[in-house]
Image (cartoon, rainbow, N blue to C red):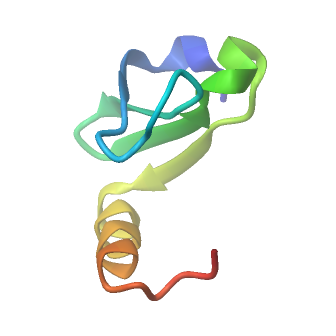
Amino acid sequence: MNANAFTNWRKSTSSNGPPAVRRSRRSPDLRGVRDSKLGDAGPILVFGRRAWSKFLTSLKFGKTDT
């Protein structure tokens, strides 16, 4: 899936400076995440609604490798 499939990319509130993580909704059930340094040509991680919620929860509680 390319960046054109998603609209209204928004910068993450936790990103500092110009390079940032961007997120967008394609539909109520899909979320896209990309690295703004790579622009529209970069890969997009696509999450379903439930997976996105679990991903955010894991970040909030520090359950991811960084």
Q: How many marks?
A: 0
Position of the C terminus by quadrant: bottom right
Q: Position of residue 6 (x, y in %)?
A: 46, 20
Q: Position of residue 1 (x, y in %)?
A: 66, 29
Tell me which residue sits at (47%, 54%) in the image.
Answer: 47
Q: Position of residue 20 (x, y in %)?
A: 53, 32
* 44 and 1: which is toward the camera: 44
Q: Position of residue 39 (x, y in %)?
A: 67, 16
Taking 24 as reference, is 28 above or below it? below
Q: Give the quadrant of residue 12.
A: top left
Taking 65 as reference, is 3 above or below it? above
Tell me which residue sits at (64%, 37%) in the image.
Answer: 44
* 16 and 27: which is toward the camera: 16
Tell me which residue sits at (77%, 17%) in the image.
Answer: 41
Tell me which residue sits at (35%, 47%) in the image.
Answer: 14
* 24 and 15: which is toward the camera: 15
Q: Residue furthest front?
A: 17
Residue 65 as seen in the image, left or right of residue 42:
left
* 13 and 32: which is toward the camera: 13
Q: Give the quadrant of residue 15.
A: top left
Taking 51 as reference, is 20 above or below it? above
